[in-house]
Image (cartoon, rainbow, N blue to C red):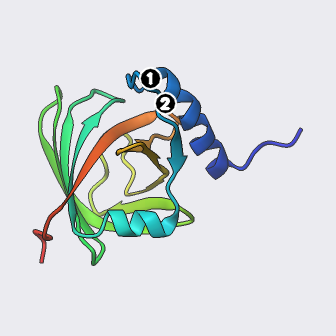
Amino acid sequence: MRRPAPLLALPLCALCCLSCHSGDASRTACEPLAGEAITGLFADVIHRAAVEDGVGGTAVNHWCQGGHFVSRWTSPAGPGEIEGRWWVSEDLRCVSVEDPLPGDGATRRCVPLLRCGERIASVNAKGGIHGWHVLEPSPCPLN
């Protein structure tokens, strides 16, 4: 039996999950973001995110055009902060950090992003929604 490519399966599964779990009464259709769109959206912005998976919480992330990012979050488990690099590869937003990421200990992660009307959603490894993101232009605090 032939299995679908893993990178294609995640966005498709996420589209199914969105209609069930987004809480959006209009059930706005979601579309995967391509590389150029991701690069344009995440250059010198701040984004505020509501985390849906894991322990929940909120995050404020700065994404710099030069490829740096900083993420600060609060959750029932406590606050945290991490800095690293970001880039786009095969229509995925990727990050790398020196210290392991909370939860899974990874130092590198690439995830699909979806545009759902005016909102952006990041997709977790299980194909569900990691978080909903609101983007605003902002100078990079790491320069």
Residue 90 location (% of width, % of height)? 57, 65
Q: Which residue is mark 1?
A: 21
Residue 53 location (% of width, % of height)? 36, 30
Q: Residue at x 57, y 44 (%)?
A: 11
Q: Residue at x 44, y 64 (%)?
A: 37
Q: Left or right: where does residue 99 sit relative to residue 36?
A: left
Q: Amino acid at mark 2?
A: Leu
Up/down of 37 relative to 73, above or below = below
Q: Amino acid at mark 1?
A: His
Q: Residue at x 50, y 66 (%)?
A: 35
Please identify the residue farthest to the front as the structure is shown.
Answer: 26
Give the secondary structure at mark 2: helix
Up/down of 20 relative to 92, above or below = above
Quarter placement of the N terminus: top right
The answer to which of 107 and 21 lies nearer the viewer is 21
Q: Which mark is residue 18?
A: 2
Label 1 environment density (alpha carbons within 10 Å; few <14, some 14–19, many ≥20) = few
Up/down of 83 relative to 112, above or below = below
Residue 82 location (% of width, % of height)? 20, 55
Q: Left or right: where does residue 10 sit relative to residue 2?
A: left
The answer to which of 99 and 44 lies nearer the viewer is 44
Up/down of 82 relative to 22, above or below = below
Give the secondary structure at mark 1: helix
Q: How many marks?
A: 2
Looking at the image, do the residues carrying marks 1 and 2 touch, with CB atoms under 8 Å apart? Answer: yes
Please identify the residue farthest to the right as the structure is shown.
Answer: 1
